[in-house]
Amino acid sequence: MPRGRKIDHIAPFGYMVAVQSAFKKVTVNIPVDTLRHATRITGRGITPTIIEGLHELERRAKRSALRKLRGKIRFELDLEASRR
């Protein structure tokens, strides 16, 4: 560390607050076979696998909401014009 610089003792705690607000630590009971199968499918660790599963749930909910709009929104598309 260069001479004359003081250590900022608050900075590490500011970082921790930012990290804590972005993530939530949870404890869950998941069947071992289900977790093992899911991690094999994703090829990743436990946390990334769970995050991917939660994102998939979010995508499903969005698709479901879009399907509920079917027939309620007028949409016209000229395929020939869009292919040019």
Image (spheres, helix red, strand yellow):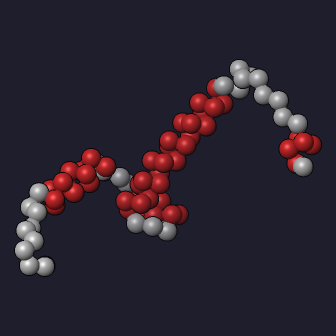
> Left or right: 60 with respect to 26?
right
Where is the N terminus found, in terms of image quarters? bottom left
Against 54, residue 15 (above or below) is below
Against 35, residue 65 (above or below) is above
Instruction: Give x and y (percent) for residue 71.
Output: 74, 22
Residue 5, quarter of picture: bottom left
Instruction: Give x and y (percent) for residue 77.
Output: 84, 34
Q: Is residue 27 visible?
A: no
Residue 3, quarter of picture: bottom left
Q: Residue at 45% across / 64% down in the picture?
A: 39
Q: Is residue 75 visible?
A: yes
Against 38, residue 58 (above or below) is above
Residue in the foreground of this view, choosing between 77 and 45: 77
> Left or right: 57 with respect to 25?
right
Extreme residue toward the bottom, this view:
2
Instruction: Give x and y (percent) for residue 56.
Output: 52, 47
Residue in the foreground of this view, choosing between 75 and 68: 75
> Left or right: 44 with respect to 22?
right
Q: Residue at 22% across / 57% down in the picture?
A: 15
Q: Residue at 41% across / 54% down in the picture?
A: 50
> Left or right: 63 with respect to 48?
right
